[in-house]
Image: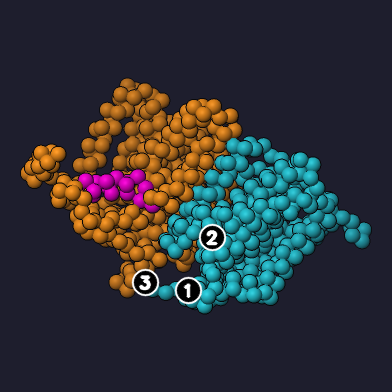
Chain colours: A cyan, B orange
Amino acid sequence: MQFFLDITLGGIATGMIVSAVALGLVLIFRATNVVNFAQGAMSMITTYIAYDVLRRGADYWLAFVVALAVGLVFGAITQSVLIRPVQGKSPLNAIIVTFGFLIFLEGLAGAIYGSTARNYPAPFSLSGQKLGGTQIAFSPFDLFVVVAVLVLMGLMLVVFRGTDLGLRMRAVAFAPEAARLLGVRVRPLLTLGWALAVAAGAMAALLVVPTSSLTPNFMDVILIYGFTAAVVGGLDSPVGALIGGLVTGLSLAYVGGYLGGSLEPMAALALVIVSLMVRPEGIFARPAARRV
Amino acid sequence: MAGLRSTVQALTAKRWFRLPRQPMLRHLSFAAVAAVALYFLTQWLSAFNDYEVGQIGFYAIALAGLTLLTGINGQISLGHGGFMAVGGFTYALLVEHTTWSLVPELLVAVGVSAVVGAVIGIPATRLRGPYLAGMTLMVALGLPYITNQYNSIFGGDQGLNTPPPTGPASVNPTEWLTWIQLLGALIVLVLLGNLVRSRFGRSFRAVRDDEIAASLTGIHVARTKVIAFMVSAGCAGLAGAFLALSAGGVNSAEFPLALSIYILAGVVLGGTGSLMGVWWGAIIIVYLPTQWSQSLASDFHANALVSANLAVIIFGLVLIVTMLVAPGGIQGGLRWLAAKGAAYLSSGGVSNMTLSLQEPTDRPVSDGESVRTTTK
């Protein structure tokens, strides 16, 4: 029972991180119909930059803010330089470009920093706490992870549901042509969508890295878990990203805890296959019609 | 210049040499010429170079499989390294537990990979681009590492041994393996070349161009997509078994994500949808990471980290730049040049032919014809 409880708590913490990655993927997919396979690698780069900032003696929170800010700029530049030219062409082109960017960035990080694993500090303790006499595997850092992702989700909700900017962004995602005709400037909004998504990914990476370690490919597996969560929840639903992230995090925790850690990626694949068989559009996605 | 043109025209007008019109005969005659040329090439090269030529052979097999899937059927796979792992491990397990000869072992490896391909391909029939790409990325990242979970079967980090096949005593073993790999590549390319020009190939392309229109003309879209996936995964499995033979053993580290990336980059660079283009891609996959990038790094006096990662960086750039600038790849570029040249020779100047490199077609482009395929 204790073991079950521990891996459940671990699964929730992982699930929240996975939700943040999924949110980044969903924001981009909604706006531009592209799954950004480079998202993990991009947030790996922002984490290395934060690491450099820390190494120069800066405070943890300054590095945190720097990573998010770099993520915003990085996302905007990537969208305007790499994605805009393939936008509207065969979806294969965009997939190949983001995939190429993924390995380009991993190679670049390897060339600059090498493949040695580095430790990234956590702002709070990583060890489990005593709660009413029993030791539980939920650290203050895990609590920070949950709160941080919930704050991120809340901010996104406020921006998208409560502001004029968010309304325009949703309009662009929903019907770009109609939005353009109604006077919405589509291009900067697509760029902004990418900027926000990459910043969300940058935050997710900062939440992963203390319990993993900083290497050029530490986000690879997290990215496919985020993709799993996005598919389970529906690729165009931010709420689905949160629920999908929790489902994915818990499933992986149970598989890893009871069957073995090397099976986790394949468990994610099985989850994707099952959820696509049962509900192809995801739990929360709006039903989509495909046009001839 | 005019004299040259008239000479060439006179030569081509006479038709002193005509390729067989029947695809099977045409492909077999190509393959026979290639086999003779490759035989002399391996004789002429040293043993180490033979080894690399054999690698070109099996990468060509994997690339041809992915070309069929992505270029001709329009489904993407970022995980062909995972299917190669299936083929390699199946072959190694057969070597360990049976006393069969090479060919049935290879055929079983192909069959098992094709079945795993079907497991991925069946849910994929309900999906479009990004979902399938993500699923296959999981195959690349996850499948090889299952073997780490079951050390007693797959030998853990050490992996399993695959001793090289023994040929006649007079033949150098490396050369013998190279011949087997090249022969395998030629057989696969002839078979795929015929498949692409058969009823199946036409339905593959019809499904790529418009699924709904294809199903209205009586094509079973889901079955067509699954068949394409199985053939493609089977090719990757054969390539994986050959990779195991080249390396002398298999373990999960031989099938990293980078392998899947190299294969995709090779297909894109060679020319998506072109079976001849796979040779360009295979040559680049074999020589770029080992030789070209090393010499490039030493030319620029780069440090060890840079030279170790240069190949990956270049492959990433290749994927991006090819997609942005020349989606037809090398073979698309050559075809474009050939079409320009033919137009120049026949009409005395470059005509107003418009030839899009967007989606290479598989048939020759005649003068003045505008080629445009639409995909959504």
Q: Looking at numbered disc 3 in the image, what kind of residue is underneath it?
A: Ile
- CB under 8 Å between discs 1 and 2: no
- The residue identified by callout 3 is B212
Q: Chain of mark 1?
A: A
Front disc: 3 or 2: 2
**Image quadrant of residue A53?**
top right
Q: Position of residue A114 (x, y in %)?
A: 63, 36
Which residue is labeled 2 in the image?
A35
For disc 3, the neighbor class at 10 Å (few under 14, some 14 to 19, many from 20) is some
Please identify, in this view, whether the residue under mark 1 or under mark 2 is nearer the observer. Answer: 1
In this image, A287 relative to A64: left or right? Answer: left
Residue A92: within the magenta?
A: no
Q: CA distance from mark 1 to mark 3?
A: 24 Å
Query: In the image, is residue B122 above or below residue A213?
Result: below
Kind of residue at disc 1: Glu
Q: Which residues are magenta?
A: B327-342
Disc 1: which residue: A177
